[in-house]
Amino acid sequence: MKRYCGRDFSEAELTLIRTLIAEDPRRTRADLSRLACQAIHWFKPDGGLKDMSCRVAVLRMQEDGLIQLPPPRRQRPETRIRISVETDPQTPIQAPVHALPGLQLRLVGTRADSCLWNEFIHRYHYLGFKTLPGAQLRYWVMAGDRLVALLGFGAADWQCATRDHFIGWTHEQRQQNLHLIVNNARFLILPWVRSENLASKVLGLTARQLPHDWQYRYGIRPLLLETFVEKDRFTGACYRAANWLHVGKTQGRGKLGPSGKQSVPIKDVWLHPLGKGFRQGLVR
């Protein structure tokens, strides 16, 4: 049994994937991922194929010497984000949150909006831009007609010991219900904005609105939010003020790091339940 992208693959399933590769050399890697999902019944909670996860899984299988994929048809172009005047620093905002115009969350929708959101994150967030995994929502945070912050949410981490212990998950329950957790992957208050209590106010607003937006887009109502705060860089005070729970720390291994050895910065794990019955829903 081999484990990739949160799923265990039996030897019979690995043999099936090898057969799909061998029976038609004209198939692309994307074709193989879709066919493999159908063959091994790997679906999203909404019934769609988990073909993107499968594509990552087969690449890792190849790295481990278990399969040999056909060569890629074309090289993926390097993602380049060009800096434009649209993201240049703006007139400073210096006022406590209660003195700002009413805050609103606006979903990033159009392609132009998406590119601009990416540009802001690339230019001003310390982690830079990276495509969010799986299902995702991105927001503009507006104070009246002024942009003050940006948020990005994506799929939960496959495994986090402190989170999983807090929930009380078994391995099987985590596999079945991981889609009910949403990860706050990016939170950027623009550097020219100085507003006391803005961050916690935004987080509170998000916790109320995101479950509805997520359900509308994906047909799934999340039960828990998670985020990981680099402990040597930030205190996480805004999450605490917004009633998030600090449940522990990561082990610093990252997704692909070797067991027992720190390979990435250790982060504080913060969780925010989205309702009183969240735990029952996650362990059912």
Image: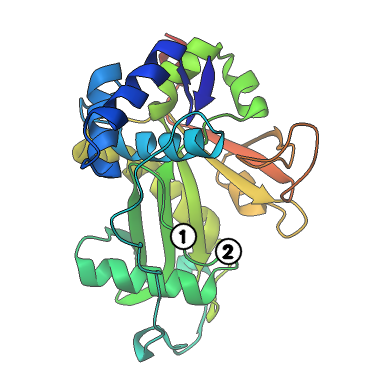
Residue 262 spot, x, y in % from top left: 78, 43
Residue at disc 1, secondary structure: loop
Q: Which residue is mark 1?
A: 130
- The amino acid type found where label 1 is placed reads Lys
Residue 230, position as x, y percentages in the image = 69, 52
Tell me if mark 1 has few (under 14), some (14-19) or many (20+) residues whose alpha carbon lies within 10 angstroms of its own: few
Identify the residue position indicated by label 2 in the image: 127
Q: Examine the rendering and report whether any part of residue 41 can be seen.
A: no
Residue shown at 49% from the left, 19% from the top:
174
Displayed quadrant of residue 13: top left
Q: Which mark is residue 172?
A: none
Residue occupying image coordinates x 34% and y 56%? 138
Is residue 173 in view? Answer: yes
Report if the CB atoms under discs 2 and 1 are less than 8 Å apart.
yes
Label 2 packing within 10 angstroms: few (<14), some (14-19), many (20+): few
Please tell me which residue lies in front, 97 or 128.
128
Q: How many marks?
A: 2
Nearer to the camera, 194 or 210:
210
